Amino acid sequence: MGIGVAAAAALIGIPSGLGPPDAIDGRVLGRLAALAVLSGLLALPVALPASIGRGYLPAVGGLMVLVVGAQVAMVAGAGNWWPWSVAAIWAMGTDAGMEPVGPVWLTVVPMVSALGAAATVAWWPHVEVVLPAVGHTVPPFSVVTHVIWDLGPASYLWGIVIPSPQS
């Protein structure tokens, strides 16, 4: 979506009379698109508290902790080391008075995202899916691999998946 916003901003400038983007505008649009991708990647670790807490509120709490942590890191002068602020510092650049961010710190963002996603996936085998329609629990991966028997095809519309009786 962020890449689309950058492309739309570039295309809107032409009919509005601003003309095509020049080299500086292209650099800014490239940073905007990269910032959107990096910020999207940094949302992946928030899936772990959502999975552990079985809802969206733990994810909101985890996100708030990360945002406050980014602010504290910036005030303390460690913003270049905190993955949740390094992308924004890089995108603002030295023109905005920020310290330069090395490419090594930008590679930390995908690594943190991969670790968060891996931790979330590692958590999933330890949980159970409760099916309120029938009142029993099944491991989450078996929900996907079984055929619906009890409720028929309409149960897909309700999001209810029933394991087959043969399991």
Image (cartoon, rainbow, N blue to C red):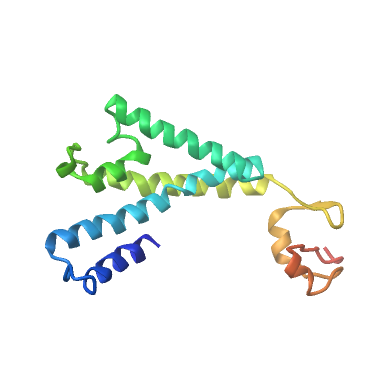
Considering the image in quadrants, where does the C terminus appear? Answer: bottom right
The residue positioned farthest toward the front in the image shown: 17
Q: Residue at x 34, y 29 (%)?
A: 73
Task: Give the residue furthest to the top.
Answer: 76
State the count of labels. 0
Left or right: 18 as drawn, with respect to 162: left
Front residue of 102 and 17 = 17
Nearer-the-camera pick, 140 or 3? 3
Residue 58 sits above or below residue 165 on the image: above
Residue 39, percent from left and from top:
38, 50
Q: Give residue 87's position: percent from left, percent from top.
A: 31, 45
> Is residue 53 found left or right of 1 in the rendered image?
right
Please state if 159 lies on the left or on the right of 100 as rendered.
right
Which of the 4 image quadrants contains residue 146? bottom right
Q: Where is residue 133 in the image (x, y as percent from the top left)?
A: 84, 57
- Which image quarter: residue 147? bottom right
- At a point 20% along the width and 38% down the height, the residue shown is 98
Viewer-side residue, 105 vs 38 = 38
Task: Please tell me which residue is depicted at 56% across the width and 43% down the height of the picture.
Answer: 48
What residue appears at the point 24 percent right and 59 percent down from the top-left corner? 30
Q: Where is residue 99 in the image (x, y as percent from the top left)?
A: 19, 36
- Quadrant placement of the N terminus: bottom left
